[in-house]
Image (cartoon, grey):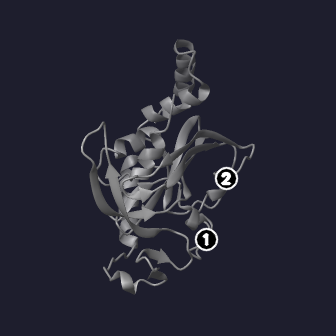
C-alpha cells in the first residue's frame, strides 16, 4: 500500500496537472488506482468471504405459491402480501407499434412495486485514501450464496419495517442532512423495466468525515478501495448488480 507521502505527492501532481478536477474527483481517482489496502488485503478478503459462506447454513426449498405464508391471491388472481406493501405479481398485456410498423403484443407477469428504495454505499477516508464500506450479503437467488453488495440495499417496505424485522444497518447515513456527511452521488434510477413496474431506487454514495467514528460495524461488512472493487468485478457472480449500478453513477 502506498504511504501517506506518496499520496500527498500524487494529490499535488494531479491538482497541478488537472486543475479542473475537484478534490472529490481526485479522491475517487486515487481510490480507483489503489488495488490493495492494509485493512483488508484482497487475499484476506477472499478468506473472509469463504468463512462467511461456511458460517451460513442456507437452503432454498421450492413450494407452491398457494402455500406462502402471508401471501394470497386477490380477486384478479394477482399475488399480494397481506400488508398491501412489498410488491404484487400481476399480469399485463403489452402492445407496441414503432414507426408505423405492424403492432406487436405479448402477455407477461410483472412485479408491481411502485416504491423508491435505497441502494447506497458509505465511504470514508482513512490515511488519506477513500474506502468504501461493502456488505457481504446473501439472497435466495444468489449464485455463490454471498455476493458483494452496497452498504445499504433496501426497499421502502424493508426500511419502513413492514416485514417486522430490524432497521437496515446504516440507513441513518442516507436519509440525513448531517454536517459530517457529503453526498457524492444521489441519482434516482428505475429498476429493470422488463420485470418491475415503475420501481425506482435512489443510487447513493455518501462520504463521512474522516474523523467521524462509525460504531458497531457488523462482521459481514468491510472496507475496500475502489480499485479493489473494480478488480473483484472481473470475477463472475461476486459483485452484485446493485453495487455495479451505484458505482456506475460516479461522475468525475
Circles 1 and 2: CB atoms closer than 8 Å = no
Using the image as rendered, state which of residue 164 and residue 19 is in the foreground: 164
Q: Secondary structure at mark 2?
A: loop
Q: Which badge, 1 or 2, is on the more N-terminal residue?
A: 1
Q: Secondary structure at mark 1?
A: loop
**Residue 150, numbered circle:** none
Residue 192 against residue 85 in the figure, above or below: above
Q: Which residue is mark 1?
A: 161
Residue 66 against residue 120 in the figure, above or below: below
Q: Position of residue 191 (x, y in %)?
A: 44, 52
Position of residue 35 in the picture relative to residue 200 (left or right): left
Using the image as rendered, state which of residue 143 and residue 79 is in the foreground: 79
Q: Is residue 203 visible?
A: yes
Residue 6 against residue 178 in the figure, above or below: above
Q: Position of residue 222 (x, y in %)?
A: 50, 54
Quick one: label 2, few (<14), some, or many (20+) residues within 10 Å? few
Q: Position of residue 195 (x, y in %)?
A: 37, 58
Q: Which residue is mark 2?
A: 175
> Would you identify the image quadrant in which residue 248 lies?
top left
| Furthest residue toward left | 102
Give me the C-alpha separation between circle 1 and circle 2: 15 Å
Q: How many marks?
A: 2
Quick one: label 1, few (<14), some, or many (20+) residues within 10 Å? few
Using the image as rendered, state which of residue 180 and residue 88 is in the foreground: 88
Position of residue 217 in the picture relative to residue 197 (left or right): right
Residue drawn 63% across and 40% down? 183
Residue drawn 40% across and 72% down? 55
Position of residue 108 in the picture relative to residue 28 (left or right): left
Q: Position of residue 78 (x, y in %)?
A: 42, 74
> Would you identify the image quadrant in which residue 136 lies?
bottom left
Residue drawn 49% across and 56% down? 199
Using the image as rendered, state which of residue 209 and residue 82 is in the foreground: 82
Amino acid at each position: 500500500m502506498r504511504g501517506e507521502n506518496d499520496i500527498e505527492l500524487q494529490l499535488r501532481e494531479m491538482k497541478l496537472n488537472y486543475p479542473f478536477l475537484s478534490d472529490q474527483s481526485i479522491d475517487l481517482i486515487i481510490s480507483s488506482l489503489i488495488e490493495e489496502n492494509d485493512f483488508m488485503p484482497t487475499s484476506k478478503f477472499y478468506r473472509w468471504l469463504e468463512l462467511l459462506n461456511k458460517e451460513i447454513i442456507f437452503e432454498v426449498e421450492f413450494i407452491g405459491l398457494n402455500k406462502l405464508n402471508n401471501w394470497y391471491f386477490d380477486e384478479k388472481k394477482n399475488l399480494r402480501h397481506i400488508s398491501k406493501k412489498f410488491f404484487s405479481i400481476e399480469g399485463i398485456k403489452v402492445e407496441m407499434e414503432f414507426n408505423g410498423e405492424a403492432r406487436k403484443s405479448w402477455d407477461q407477469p410483472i412485479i408491481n412495486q411502485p416504491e423508491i428504495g435505497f441502494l447506497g454505499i458509505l465511504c470514508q477516508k482513512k490515511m488519506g485514501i477513500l474506502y468504501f464500506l461493502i456488505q457481504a450479503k446473501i439472497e435466495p437467488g444468489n449464485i455463490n450464496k454471498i455476493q458483494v453488495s452496497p452498504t445499504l440495499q433496501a426497499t421502502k417496505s424493508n426500511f419502513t419495517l413492514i416485514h417486522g424485522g430490524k432497521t437496515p444497518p446504516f440507513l441513518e447515513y442516507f436519509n440525513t442532512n448531517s454536517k459530517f456527511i457529503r453526498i457524492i452521488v444521489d441519482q434516482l434510477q428505475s429498476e429493470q423495466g422488463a420485470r418491475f413496474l415503475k420501481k425506482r431506487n435512489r443510487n447513493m454514495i455518501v462520504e463521512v468525515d474522516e474523523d467521524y467514528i462509525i460504531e458497531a460495524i457488523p462482521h459481514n461488512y468491510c472496507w475496500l478501495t475502489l480499485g479493489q472493487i473494480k478488480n473483484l468485478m472481473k470475477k463472475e457472480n461476486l459483485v452484485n448488480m446493485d453495487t455495479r449500478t451505484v458505482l456506475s453513477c460516479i461522475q468525475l
